[in-house]
Amino acid sequence: MIGPALVLLLQVTPPLDPREAGPFRSCLGLLDEAAIPQCRAVLESPLPAGRRAIALRILGQRLAAVERWDEATEAYRRWVELEPEEPEALRRYGEVLLVAGRAEQAIGALRESVLWGAEDARAHGWLGVALNAAGRHSEAVRSFEDALEVDPTFFAARPGARSAFEASQRGERWPGPAREMP
């Protein structure tokens, strides 16, 4: 199945220059750390905004997968700069900020994500985790409740989120690492 971002990319952007096609396809197609230099090479070339956003998303994902949090944060920050109203960009930026230990900054990005994408239960959940990490338990509880309103099965595949929610209800910080929550 082709992802929605790729379908949108194919619909609204002109064909790639043949010199750019190889690295761009490698950036999209490689699923491991090998994609990182390919994505960086693509980002050094002139690209339409839609392709640049996709390359930054893929780069951020690959960097986060190998726990290069500062670099992932920078890739997602650049994506947000390019598309400031894109809920996924804001959520992913908030996620890596949180995992990097920057809860207060994460809260700002995640609040923006929820503002632009209120139907994304994951954004509400990540905001709950960030608020818990900042010791703002009642706000965290409300954010988790918002996630459940959007998706009543939200906790089913997210035991870390459930644990953070329960800790917030008790007025405690969740001891687990934020990266446990998808």
Image (cartoon, grey):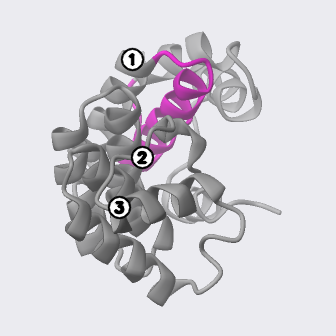
Q: Is residue 56 magenta?
A: yes
**Relative to 116, is 20 above or below?**
above
**What percent of the width, then of the height, locates residue 77?**
27, 35
Q: CA distance from mark 1 to mark 3?
A: 30 Å
**What percent of the width, then of the height, locates residue 41?**
51, 13
Q: CA distance from mark 2 to mark 1?
A: 26 Å
Q: Viewer-proximal residue, 154 or 26?
A: 154
Q: Which residue is mark 1?
A: 71
Part of the protein shown in magenta: 46-68
Q: Viewer-proximal residue, 31 or 125?
A: 125
Query: Which residue is pictured at 64% across the width and 27% down the height?
Result: 27
Q: Which residue is mark 2?
A: 174
**Relative to 182, is 2 above or below?**
below
Position of the N terminus by quadrant? bottom right
Instruction: Give neighbour class at mark 2: few <14, some 14-19, many 20+ (Cα, 10 Å).
Output: many
**What percent of the width, then of the height, locates residue 29?**
76, 33
Sequence-wise first label, 1 or 3:
1
Query: Which residue is pictured at 49% across the width and 82% down the height?
Result: 148
Q: Viewer-proximal residue, 22 or 120?
A: 120
**What percent of the width, then of the height, locates residue 63?**
53, 22
> Which SS class for mark 3?
helix
Q: Amino acid at mark 2?
A: Trp
Question: Where residue 168 is drawn, which disc sits there?
Answer: 3
Q: CA distance from mark 3 to mark 2?
A: 7 Å
Q: Amino acid at mark 1?
A: Glu
Residue lying farthest to the right in this orientation: 1
Query: Which residue is pictured at 35% across the width and 63% down the height?
Result: 170
